[in-house]
Amino acid sequence: MINQLRLNFEKRTQDGFARTGILRTWKKKVNTPAIWFGLSVIENYEFQHTVLSVNNVECFLANAYDLLYQDKNGERKRLVKHLSTKMRLKCDSGGFQTSKREIGLTVNQVYSIQQEIECDIAVQLDFPLNPQASRASNQRRINKTLKNLEEVLTINDKLSILPVIHGYDRETLDYMLEKVGEILGHDPPAIGVGSLVPLLMTSKGSGTVGGKKKVIDMLIYIRQKLPDAFLHVFGTGGTMAYLITFCGADSFDYVGWVQKAGYGVIQLPGVSDRFISEREKRKTLNEEEKKKLLECSCPACRRNSLSKFADRTPHARLLRAIHNVHVYQTEIWKMREHINEGTFRDFVFNRLEKSIWKSLIKYADSQLVKMGVYPNKFVG
């Protein structure tokens, strides 16, 4: 059986629906669970190179649309080439940006830039669904995504291609999985799941297709359909990562690290956004959280006092970004440890105990209990 995607996933350990594993691409291996830090169109080369490098980040994310249309002076392309010598690189197609701006991005354009930067994983050109759109309109997006997968596979001669599925109900997911299977001649060894961001953001129209609980239902369903496949979920990094890993995801993006640092946000494990400087309607660090921050051993915290993080200077923004990326990368390493030790369920409930996601982890847990994954509901 020929693997046209050039992706192979090996599951190592499993705890409930959470797993550790190794994804083999045409170029490098990716340890999972994995987080991909997205490059920013705002910050400069030096800022991003420093933040990602000092934290020994494993994986980062570029965007074909950005490299083709927004990177006028080639700064991010140079950054991509330098970072990819020591990190794993996934290159998204830019289908989301294309649909927003009505730019006619083609499969050949996307593949050409992905081939030029020699990314470890090349995401096919896909077209995310819109909760506000008609069923017919979303069906056209689905059909274009499937057609693009066929097209990129005919021109691909070496890259690892990640197919993408979209859907807000089982019928649509089944349709896309069936069609992807027909194109490949077998079940996909790896798949990406898109169109979830509107549901998580409670955006207009999201309630009509199920909202946040629908994300949990979809991921659990896909994991049941493809128990051995690598599963990447687009746009769901940050604190949501605990929840989707619990539901079976192996990999996810995090593109908000730059914006949060710019807004003055400090991240702590299992804690929603906090601010150091006090302003109206902003939740600042309490004494317990300040103590956690003072105990942090990241490259920013161990060399600087708390006051250095508080102002609006570029240096303070850099320190916040270094700290926040450190938190999420080290949490990935801890996730792997807890999955290997069979304690991931306890770890996730502990992390989300005081989070806005607490009710959702309870819901996800109840669904897995119904399936027999766990004998009883979690009691902390």
Image: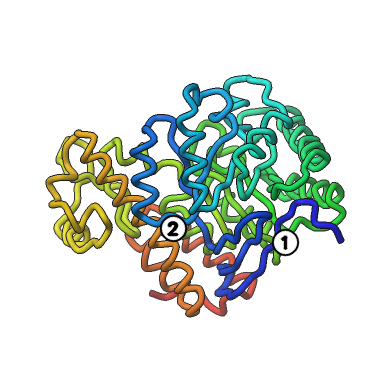
**Image: 334 above or below 302:** below
Q: Quadrant of the C terminus?
A: bottom left
Residue drawn at (73%, 61%) of the image: 225
> Which sits in the foreground, 41 or 142?
41
Q: What amino acid type is highlighted by mark number 1? A: Leu
Q: Quadrant of the N terminus?
A: bottom right
Helix, strand, or loop for circle 2? helix
CB under 8 Å between discs 1 and 2:
no
> Which sits in the foreground, 97 or 68?
68
**Image: 349 above or below 147:** below
Q: Position of residue 302 (x, y in %)?
A: 20, 58
Residue drawn at (37%, 32%) of the image: 44
Q: Circle 2 is placed at which residue position?
A: 359
Number of labels in the image equals 2
Mark 1 or mark 2: which comes first in sequence? Answer: 1
Q: Position of residue 80 (x, y in %)?
A: 50, 40
Name which quarter of the figure residue 66 lies in.
top right
Q: Is 92 placed left or right of 39 in the picture? A: right
Residue drawn at (25%, 46%) of the image: 319
Q: Position of residue 306 (x, y in %)?
A: 14, 50
Badge 2: residue crowd in 10 Å (few <14, some 14–19, many ≥20): few
Q: What amino acid type is highlighted by mark number 2? A: Ser
Q: Position of residue 36 (x, y in %)?
A: 50, 50
Q: CA distance from mark 1 to mark 2?
A: 26 Å
Name which quarter of the figure residue 205 lies in.
top right
Looking at the picture, the colour scheme in use is rainbow
Residue drawn at (47%, 56%) of the image: 58
Q: Circle 1 is placed at which residue position?
A: 226
**Image: 32 above or below 162:** below
